[in-house]
Image (cartoon, rainbow, N blue to C red):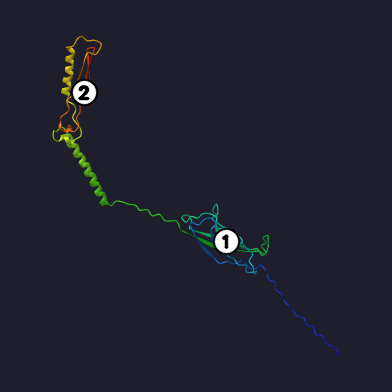
Amino acid sequence: MESYKHKATATLIVQVTRKNEWKPKSPVDTFAVPEDSPIGTIVGVVEFTDADLPFDNIKCSIAGGNDGIPPTFYMEPNTGQLKLLNLLDAETTDHYSLTIQAVDLNNDIEPDPLKQKTSFTTVTVNILFTTAVLILTSTYWSPDHWFVALMVIAGLLALGVLYGLAWILFKTHPKCGQFFPKCQKPDKTHLTNVIESGQNQQSNSSPVSKEPKSETNSTLSPDNSAKCRERHIYSTVRLDIQDGQTRAQIYKN
């Protein structure tokens, strides 16, 4: 018995999809770091996902917002860790807005724009103030305090003026003079008498020679005024008679 074979033709459509069709995906991230953080501190990790392959072959880098010299931040390409590369100063800059670039290498060593996809995301880094705030406390005088101070100063000046007037008017008074520190000067009349006495001795002496003939020493009596009771002043008069001339020298003890 002869067998019959049947043949049929079917059309199959096979659609090939590019391996690296989609760009890496990442959520928008916000980080915060204390102002006093040392260099090398990990601020945060920027994560990207490869939507085409079951494994991630993504390299990350900072593409903008890191223009300091030296730069403030550094990113590990393979892990996406954002680290500090410089010290922070919240008084100068309290936040940074960084543009992060992610490239899906698709197992290519050399860049290939047809096979590699690149995406960008923005990361905000806020700087937290940790430096102690210096509080200045200033003391000031109210108008009432100024009035009291001016009255005290005026009173002291008035007392000084009154004391000066009293010293001028009563410095030689027998009873009141003791309250003033300045003493009277030696009596000039007594000093004149001593000098005249020395001259008389010269006239009654032998003829003048080149050597000194005599010396007359006289000590003035202490001043007995009321204001010099606590302190006495003695004056010594030395008379040198030589070559017919009399020299008087006064010594204050």
Residue 162, picture quadrant: top left
What residue is rendered at 23% in x and 23% in y? 251
Exactly how many numbered labels are in the figure? Answer: 2
32 or 100: nearer the eye? 32
The image quadrant where one finds the C terminus is top left
Report the residue marked by disc 2. Answer: 236
Where residue 157 appears, as percent x and y from the top left, is: 22, 41
What residue is rendered at 22% in x and 43% in y? 156
Where residue 119 appears, as percent x and y from the top left, is: 60, 64
127 or 241: nearer the eye? 241
236 or 246: nearer the eye? 236
The image quadrant where one finds the N terminus is bottom right
Q: Going from the N terminus, do you reach mark 2 or mark 1 first?
A: 1
- The CA span between labels 2 and 1 is 102 Å
Residue 81, picture quadrant: bottom right
Disc 2 residue type (three-letter): Thr
The numbered disc on residue 81 is 1
